[in-house]
Structures are given as C-alpha cells and as structure tokens.
Image: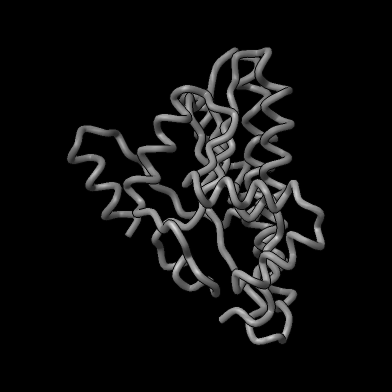
Amino acid sequence: MLDALAETCRARGARVETSRIDLEDDAQLFAWLDALCAADLPDLVIANAGMNISHEGGQGEDWQAASQLLALNLRTPMAMLNRLAPPMRERGSGQFVLMSSLAAYHGLPITPSYSASKAGIKAYGEAMRGWLAPHGVGVTVVMPGYVSSRMCHAMPGPKPFLWQPDRAARRIQRGAARNRARLSFPFPLNFGCWWLAVLPAGLAQRFLNWLNYGEQAS
C-alpha cells in the first residue's frame, strides 16, 4: 500500500522517499529523523500513525496491546516533536500536524486507552504550539470524528456523520496551511463531543450510555 501511494505521488510530480522503521524504537526513529534533517529540515511534519483497541465484551483491554497503543499513538508523536521542534524553532519556520480525535474531549468507555492517547496528543500539541509560536513554528491539532478506514470500521459502537478520507484530507490540508490551532470536524459531532467535556462528568457518561457508547455497545 505504501509503495502504491508513493507511485501515485510520483506520477503527479512529487519526489517521494519511503522508509520502514519501528516507530516505537527510539534509536530507529531518531536515526531516521536525523537522516532526514541532514538532507533537508522538513517544512511540514504530519504525525499520523496510530492504532485502536477496545474492551468490547467486558473482558477489559489487553495490557500489552494498550501499552503498544500508547507508545504508537502518544509517545511516538511526542518523540518526533522533541527531536524536530528545536531545529525548526531555531530556523524560525515549519508546521507540525498532530492527529488527535474527538474522543479527546471525553473518554469513550469502549475505547479507554485510545481516548487517553488522543487526549494526551491534544494537550501536548496545544502546549507545544504555545512554545513554538513565538519562533514562527506552527502546531495544528486535528480532532476528527469518524473517517472511513479499516480502523474506524473495526471500532465498536455507532459511527454518526461518517466522512470519506478525501474530504477529511482536504479539510486538514486547508487548516494546516492556515496554521489553525485546532481542526475538529464534522460540526454536529464536534459540537456534541465538546458538550461532553463541558457537562458534569456523570451526566456526560449517562449520555454516552444512552447513545450506545457504554459497556453494552457492540
């Protein structure tokens, strides 16, 4: 899939280099980033790798899977910014795009580790934006709802206001180009999830159960 995407981009005139590394291995990740920076410090970095698990069925999340999820979804993007932000800050330009989720507003009972990882990315991205903004480097935190993909469709629970990937990509492209602090979509789901964060936690939880995002979701 990666090679096919690379060829599509090359056919449209892009220069593409692909690499396969273990993103959870700091040594491999930092060596790859250092090699990229040695050739040319990036102007735009999109940290998009991620995974999801659930404890559907009432058995609880597998801890090894949860640990891997946190390493990939949260620790890897943080490591990338930790390595790349200082040279971009010194240069005085650049843009980071971090993939959070509307689940960052209020954790979903069916995917607690995923929700935690995305809440962490939201907080980290907002903090890094404040640190980097005075030096000309932007950080955009993307908080999508349901975007059609294998990972999305494997997630238990309803998927209202589902977007297709090309629509989401256009929204992210426009927002990152404008250095938007936060991109959260689609509007109806974003508005509802925002209210989950504002309401008392007990009331928000009852709403989630009523919408079939509680323990009984399948």
Which residue is rendered at x = 72% and y = 39% of the image? Answer: 124
In the displayed structure image, the side of residue 34 where residue 200 appears, left or right: right
Extreme-left residue of the structure: 11
- Tell me residue 135's x, y (percent): 65, 13
Residue at 35% over, 38% down: 170
Q: Residue at x 72, y 23 (%)?
A: 130
Q: Is residue 32 above or below residue 209?
A: above
Residue 26 shows in this picture: no
Quadrant of residue 150 in the image?
Answer: bottom left
Residue 103 x, y percent position in the rendering = 63, 55
Rendered image quadrant of residue 60: bottom right
Q: Is residue 128 above or below residue 121?
A: above
Q: Residue at x 63, y 56 (%)?
A: 72
User: Where is the N terminus found, in terms of image quarters?
Assistant: bottom left
Q: Which of the two residues, 33 or 187, is positioned nearer the viewer here? A: 187
Where residue 202 appears, as percent x and y from the top left, is 81, 62
What colouring style does the render use? one colour
Residue 215 position (above or below residue 97): below
Evaluate whether residue 160 shows in this view.
yes
Q: Quadrant of the C terminus?
A: bottom right
Question: Which is more toward the observer, 211 or 145?
Answer: 211
Number of numbered discs: 0
Residue 7 spot, x, y in % from top left: 23, 47
